[in-house]
Amino acid sequence: MDMLIEVKELIYRRRKGFCLRIDENGDLIVIAPYYATENDIRKVIQKKANWILKTREVVLRNLQKTKPLKFVKGESILFLGENFKIDFHNKSDVLLDEKNKVLYLPYGEHTTLYRKLKLFYYEQARKILKEELDRWSNIMGLEYTSFRLKDAKRLWGSCGKNGVINLNWRLILLPKPIMQHIVIHELAHLVYRNHSKQFKYFVSQYSSNYSEKEKWLRDNSYILQMFRED
Ligand SMILES: [Zn+2]
């Protein structure tokens, strides 16, 4: 097939319309109905060319940002939406110098450092997210039953029917207003089990600029892929 945009995978399915997807490597996957001709496919791709190129650009840019850490002095690392610089010290724990935006690591092997850093993030996330949950549940007058820290791949958080709030530990990497937005969002699910207009109105009473924050989350969804070992 001669086409401006290369299709990495073409899948035929028993379905009515087309589905175009950009995978995690920025490649185009086309899911087409059985009856689709080459010309149909070419037309769909042409029609969606702008979207394909734009989405691919975002994916490739984000791929760059999720590169594994090398653990070298001066390397950038996220904490509460800010870039900290990695440095090393003669102690065995991880230390955060918030004033100078430096994250101190002990000397050690890559795998040890990785484990210690992740443990540090988990501990911080557990503490800060619990504080935020308690603070906002108080303000909103809502009660949750318990809180669990998760390592989910696609979700920032969820709210179980039993009133359990699940939050992704990577929320610790986001700017605080965005983190709070998600905490408020999940707490609001204790009342509304959907994303209706009423739900959004309720959330926006506690978290300003609802759509801007949602857009930020969409644009920065690559953070969900950070610190993955698989
Ligand atoms: Zn939701």
Image (spheres, rainbow, N blue to C red):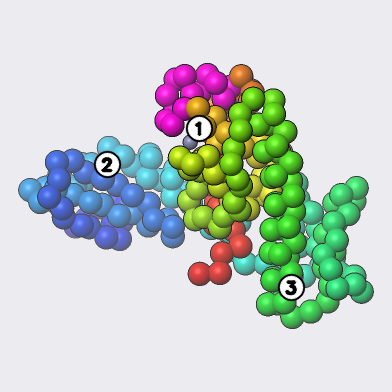
Viewer-proximal residue, 154 or 40? 154
Amino acid carrying label 2: it is Gln
Query: What separation in Å lies between label 1 and label 2 (alpha carbons)?
Result: 40 Å
Please, which residue is most extreme toward the left here? 35
- Disc on res. 46: 2
Q: Are marks 1 and 2 in contact (CB under 8 Å)?
A: no
Residue 30 is left or right of residue 62, and the answer is left
- Disc on res. 189: 1
For marks 2 and 3, the one nearer the N-term is 2
For marks 1 and 2, the one nearer the N-term is 2
- Magenta residues span 192-204
Discs 3/1, front? 1
Residue 105 is left or right of residue 160, and the answer is right
Q: Are marks 3 and 1 in contact (CB under 8 Å)?
A: no
- Disc on res. 160: none
Read off the residue under disc 3: 113
On the image, the x and y values in percent for residue 164 come to: 54, 44
The residue that appears at 30% across and 60% down in the rendered structure is: 8
The residue that appears at 33% across and 49% down in the rendered structure is: 21
User: Against 86, is 168 above or below?
Assistant: above
Q: Magenta span has 203? A: yes
Indicate yes or no: mark 1 CB to ligand 1 under 8 Å: yes
The residue that appears at 83% across and 76% down in the rendered structure is: 107
For marks 3 and 1, the one nearer the N-term is 3
- Residue 95, picture quadrant: bottom right
* Label 2 crowd bin: few (<14), some (14–19), many (20+), radius 10 Å: some
